[in-house]
Amino acid sequence: MDKLTGMKVFASVARAGSFVGGAKEMSISRAMATKHIGHLESYLGARLFNRTTRSLSLTDVGAAYLQRCRTILAEIDEMEDAVTQLHTEPRGKLKISSPPIIGALYIAPAIAEFLAMHKDLSVNLVLQSSFGDLVDEGIDVAITFGGLEDTSHIAKKLASSPLLVCGAPAYFDVHGKPLVPDDLLKHSCLVNWAISPRNKWLFRGLEGKKEVLVSGRMQANAADPIRIAAKKGLGLVMLPEYIVARDIEKGYLQVVLDDYAIEPMKIHAVYPHRKYLSAKVRTFLVFLEEWLKTRSAARE
């Protein structure tokens, strides 16, 4: 029997949680689905499913094989798409993951413009702090910022955003403004643990590099809570410009220590390791990179 078809049937049965559901998804009979799975198990010399009269679950071997099958099947789909739709309009569904703030302020408006240009495309935008398992969650592109530790994915730099230290005027009225990085040791510094530098704020001035171990009255695993706390006068924050730009424009926050250079925060598009990219992903990446270049808070 055809091994590729067997892999498709296996993935469908695993996704559906039953032979009946998997067979229906593949438009074949339950008996044919069972035959395909049996052929795969014979070829591999291992059982892929634990079967009872009431339930169906993957074995450890089956779970590992499923991950490989999903990768191979996705690569085949994308290879065919790249060949057959190289010069055609992107179409289908595009699933994008993004951190909440940049997703709401930048990625969502970009998607709206992108969809207006491509009528045969739809987008599912997922706002979440970490992009998780791209293959398992079916995510085509994940937008992320900061350092990348997972080398199993491909990352394309789209832009970068300067890191700014800022606080509310009301806070400065009471505590004064820091003039040099070491002054931060006397201030309440609100820390975002989701991205580097976390509580180690790095600066570069005439004296060279300076690392300050900061602390404050509030920490969070996302940027928005500490941004709001800073606006309320609770302390200082170091956040990418795209997050605080509007608050600075409105006077809610003021920038300090701007004479000291801080490494910009890189914005990446991350996608599963693929030899071929689908037209929808490739076109979106080109569009988003150009779109971000026109925004003052997201630069090359």
Image: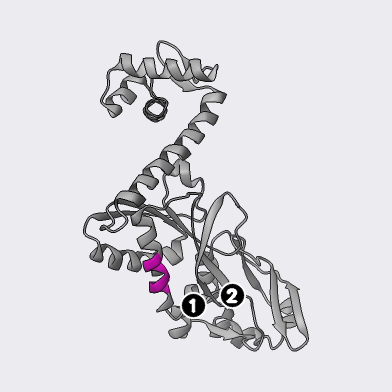
Judge by depth and name the residue closer to the eye, 120 or 72: 72
Q: Give me the residue at 55% from left, 69% from top.
A: 266
Residue 148, percent across and down?
Answer: 60, 58
Question: Quadrant of the image for the N terminus?
Answer: top left
Q: How many marks?
A: 2
Q: Is residue 139 above or below residue 221?
A: above
Q: Give me the residue at 56% from left, 24% from top.
A: 61
Q: Which residues are magenta?
A: 286-292
Label 1 environment density (alpha carbons within 10 Å; few <14, some 14–19, many ≥20) = some
Image-based side of 38 in relation to 62, left or right:
left
Label 2 environment density (alpha carbons within 10 Å; few <14, some 14–19, many ≥20) = some
Q: Is residue 17 above or below residue 272?
A: above
Q: How is the image coloured?
A: one colour
Mark 2 → mark 1, Cα distance in angstroms? 9 Å
Residue at disc 1, secondary structure: loop
Mark 2 lies on residue: 264
Can residue 104 be seen at all in this image of the molecule?
no
Magenta span main SS: helix
Residue 197, percent across and down?
Answer: 66, 67
Q: Give me the residue at 70% from left, 74% from top.
A: 202
Q: Give me the residue at 60% from left, 74% from top.
A: 238
The quadrant in which residue 31 appears is top left
The quadrant in which residue 55 appears is top left
Can residue 217 be seen at all in this image of the molecule?
yes
Q: Cβ–Cβ below 8 Å for labels 2 and 1?
A: yes
Q: Which mark is residue 299?
A: 1
**Circle 2: residue type:** Pro
Residue at disc 2, secondary structure: loop
Q: Earlier in the sequence, mark 2 or mark 1?
A: 2
